[in-house]
Amino acid sequence: MRNRMLTLLLILLLVAACSPNSIEPKSAQRSAPVDGAESAAITLSSTVSNINVTPLTGDNLIDASVEYLGELKFDVTGTTARTINFVDELTTYSYSGREINWNVQLNPAVPLALEVTSSSGNFDLNLRDFMLAGLEIHGSSGNMELALPASDAPYPVEITSSSGNLTAAVDVGGQVSFQSISGSSGNTTITAEAGSVVCADVMTSSGAITFVVMSGASLDAELSSSSGNIVIDVPDDAAVRLDVRSQTSGNVTIPANYTHTGNGDKTGVWQTDGYDDAEVQIDVVITTLSSGNIEIR
């Protein structure tokens, strides 16, 4: 009996040692010089790591210190148009250990198209000093903190998430086209700083949607949600038009000086005086909303 118990214990130890739960994070550093690069397309892809991006000073295009679980790929191709694929390749895993991080510094002097993916990690992307040509973010349960740069022309941003919250701030004078923000239960908050131009297409399920529009910023947004509340925070003298096309059981709270056209008190168009002639406009269309509330404040 004793031998049988020892054999069983040995088998359990071997299974535990070979199971995905036994994966331990590894660490590495990677870098690549600018070396004549006039533009860069960089992909950062992890499985569970938090991904932090900050500006880099010096002659390198990228400096990174990362923790990873699978096989680390760092492929650099191209000359003037540089491409970097930086990936933690891991097909099957079950990890419940401490938080692990990718700390990535990128050179802000080189125009950048950036794609960032992490299944369950958080994102902290400080891109305010960059010349951003485009941004894609793919996440799940992790939260996203974005600082987006000013620009002379609009650049596209696409974001997918699930339960993670998104907080994004567009710098003074930034021109950003959020071509798609798709989420589930996570909340979305976007701040348009003074003089910025923001276009946004946002679709969530139960997550709240909030836009904070500073003085002199313009907004053109199309929003869709189920049970999430929608809040548009605008300056007192802003030129605003709100078009609610479908709304079921939620409340609509609009300042008293807005003119309303439409049937009932839940759908129609609310508009400030002088909107049509205003140079800077805030135009929000809510295509569908079920039980969520709508507020302009």
Image (cartoon, helix red, strand yellow):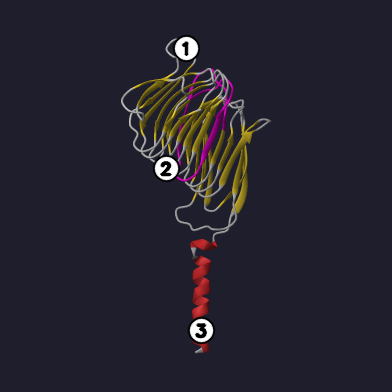
Q: Are marks 1 and 3 in contact (CB under 8 Å)?
A: no
Left/right of residue 49 with respect to residue 287 in the rendered view: right
Q: Position of residue 30 (x, y in %)?
A: 61, 42
Q: Amino acid at mark 2?
A: Ser
Q: Position of residue 228 (x, y in %)?
A: 43, 39
Return the mark for residue 278.
Answer: 1
Return the mark for residue 206.
Answer: 2
Q: Which residue is mark 3?
A: 5
Pointer 2: residues within 10 angstroms few (<14), some, or many (20+)?
many
- Toward the viewer: 228 or 9? 228
Return the mark for residue 156.
Answer: none
Q: Nearer the viewer, mark 1 or mark 3?
A: 1
Q: Position of residue 116 (x, y in %)?
A: 51, 39
Give the spatial CA distance, label 1 vs label 3: 82 Å
Region in magenta: 147-176
Work out whether residue 288 can be spotted: yes
Q: Is residue 258 above or below residue 29?
A: above
Q: Amino acid at mark 1?
A: Ala
- Toward the viewer: 230 or 126? 230
Q: Nearer the viewer, mark 3 or mark 2?
A: 2
Mark closest to the chain's N terminus, 2 or 1: 2
Q: Amino acid at mark 3?
A: Met
Give the spatial CA distance, label 2 vs label 1: 34 Å
